[in-house]
Image (cartoon, rainbow, N blue to C red):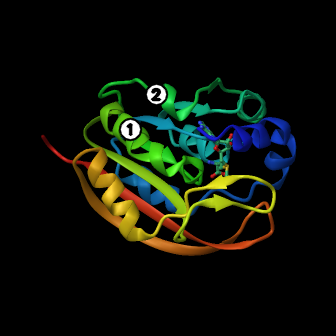
Amino acid sequence: MDHETLQFYRRNAEAYAGWTKAPSARLAGFLALLPKGGAVLELGCGAGNHAAVMLAGGFAVRVTDGSPEMAAVAARRLSYPVEAMLFDELNAQEAYDGVWASACLLHVPRTELADILSRIHRALKPSGLFYASYKIGHDDGRDSIGRYYNYPSPEWLQATYAASGRWTQLSSGTSEIKGFDEAPATMLHVVVRKAAD
Ligand SMILES: C[S@@+](CC[C@H](N)C(=O)[O-])C[C@H]1O[C@@H](n2cnc3c(N)ncnc32)[C@H](O)[C@@H]1O
């Protein structure tokens, strides 16, 4: 975990929630692949915009964020419980049909990402689905407002997923965005399925 990044989301929870854009268009496609009313874990929920869509769709959602302040903002906006949980506190086993991690695992230090991915693998039911998005790059580093990013290349990410457990890749694509720091970035969106043992 990167303390400086977490502190950013603790100190700026309201400002970040006020800036947050519309939910990702990719969420509908992800939810369509899950069983009706299935169990979904959201990591790093931020303002809760994606959780709102999942709840409206009738899914049984566990909504979490590592910043207690951000979790409180999301809980207020959703009128729904949001847990303050760090990625490395995830200890569930075969509990979820899907794990949704939009633009949050990009803050996990490179040396820790395989461990977090293996926790997600363990938390998924057999054949469970996992979405995550990252800012593409080559070397890890910080943005102009101090947040750490792992900035993976697709190749590095693929090797790190492979080191964390057995996955089947379903899709991967990119989009151009402008972050809270105002800088343009290319996002890599990855959907994988937990492979049968
Ligand atoms: C860029 S925001 C993305 C928010 C939301 N998922 C979205 O797509 O709009 C990253 C989120 O990850 C959370 N986060 C950062 N480090 C974390 C950690 N170690 N454990 C859990 N959550 C963390 C932050 O508090 C923040 O809400």
In the rendered structure, which amino acid carries the disc numbered 1? Answer: Ile
- Is any part of residue 78 visible from this angle? yes
Residue at (80% x, 68% y) in the render: 182
Note whether 43 is above or below 192 in the view shown. Answer: above
SS label for mark 1: helix
Note whether 83 is above or below 197 in the view shown. Answer: above
* Number of numbered discs overlaid on the protein picture: 2
Q: Quadrant of the N terminus?
A: top right
**Along the line of sight, the residue nearer the viewer: 34 or 36:** 34
Note whether 24 is above or below 136 in the view shown. Answer: above
Residue 106, position as x, y percentages in the image: 56, 54
Q: Name the side, left or right, on which 186 lies relative to 17.
A: left
In the rendered structure, which amino acid carries the disc numbered 2? Answer: Leu
Residue 77, position as x, y percentages in the image: 77, 35
Binning the other alpha carbons within 10 Å of mark 1 as few (below 14), some (14 to 19) or many (20 upward) gives: many
Residue at (44% x, 36% y) in the render: 40
Q: Which mark is drawn over residue 90?
A: 2
Q: Quadrant of residue 14?
A: top right
Q: Quadrant of residue 186?
A: bottom right
Q: Are marks 2 and 1 in contact (CB under 8 Å)?
A: yes
Q: Earlier in the sequence, mark 2 or mark 1?
A: 2
Q: Which mark is drawn over residue 72?
A: none
Distance of mark 2 from mark 1, alpha carbons? 8 Å
Q: Which mark is drawn over residue 120?
A: 1
Residue at (52% x, 34% y) in the render: 87
